[in-house]
Amino acid sequence: MLMRLRKKYKNWLPLYLYLIIPIVYIILFKYVPMAGLQLAFKKFKILGGIWGSPWVGLKNFERFFNSYQFTTVVTNTLTLSLYSIFAGFPFPIIFALLLNCVEKARIKKTVQTITYMPHFISTVVLVGMILQICNPNSGLVGKISMLLTGSKGTDIMATTGGFTNLFVWSGVWQNFGWDSIMYLAALTAVDVQQHEAAQIDGASRFQRVLHVDLPAILPTITIMLIMRMGSVMSVGFTKIYLMQNDLNLAASEVISTYEYKRGLANAGSTDFSLSTAIGLFNSCINLIMIVLVNAICRKVSETSLW
């Protein structure tokens, strides 16, 4: 028995060695920085450092909860996140099911390539495109408005509703092709005999998609939904910050931008302790959401992360 285990581990030794790099990475960049979370319970002083700063307990959290912007940033974060989920989550699934119905491989690969490409556009370039297109003077929107009405168009980026819709739907356009890869991979595992049996029973192509393909990828859909809900309070920072301006601030100020401004952006009035408390609050809500949604999915569909 001992010889068998020794031989087994000897054969797998190269793979265990490969694991050293990701394990070291996770420890250094994921676990070691957690020591800094204690700043959320301290009043940070540069001379004292993280360990020498005085302990203040939950005062930083109280300051955040009592802030006049608390309701605004939490509401905006949830609005953008839930809107993105409801608008963007079904698109990759529908696209994958439709693309799976295409029989010609050349057309299928061409469509896949075209829809994957937007994912590789950097956030800075994407926001630049949005700003150029929506420019009321020289942009596409402004030119069309001038052509149809004879006057300049409305500055969409200056309205709260315009910001919200542009942020969500530009994200859907950029990522739905890339996000469909997971579902297309799951569809390759569907047993061909199930389709053949459904055809013999007289099922149409739509019925086969509904009763064969969709149930086959349902576990994958459930897992992806759980993971997406685990980041419901994290709508990103870069894209929102670049699209943000004084006129749409009522809809664009979210937890991540507020945390950045309180912690780093305001020169001379930075508050690292409050910023850390905001980030910790955000992470705790995400943890609660992923545990809750995972438990619901486990009871409803018997599919879960753990």
Image (cartoon, rainbow, N blue to C red):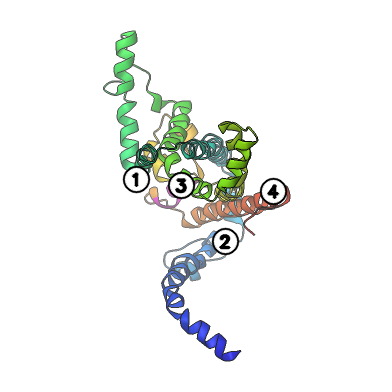
User: On the image, numbered disc 1 is attached to which residue?
Assistant: 120
Q: CA distance from mark 2 to mark 1?
A: 40 Å
Cα distance between the residues tagged 2 and 4: 40 Å
Question: Could you give the CA–CA distance between mark 4 and mark 3, rounded to whole angstroms?
Answer: 23 Å
The circle on residue 178 is none
Q: Which residue is mark 4?
A: 301
Q: Identify the element where label 4 is drawn.
A: helix
Between the C-alphas of marks 2 and 3, the distance is 42 Å
Which SS class for mark 1? helix
**Dot placed on the residue nearer the N-terminal end, 4 or 3:** 3
The single residue placed furthest to the left in the displayed view is 138
Mark sitting earlier along the chain (2/3): 2
Numbered mark located on residue 181 in the image: 3
**Mark sitting earlier along the chain (2/1):** 2
The residue indicated by pointer 2 is 41
What range is drawn magenta here?
Answer: 256-264
- Mark 4 belongs to which amino acid? Ser
Q: Position of residue 82 (x, y in %)?
A: 56, 38
Q: Secondary structure at mark 3?
A: helix
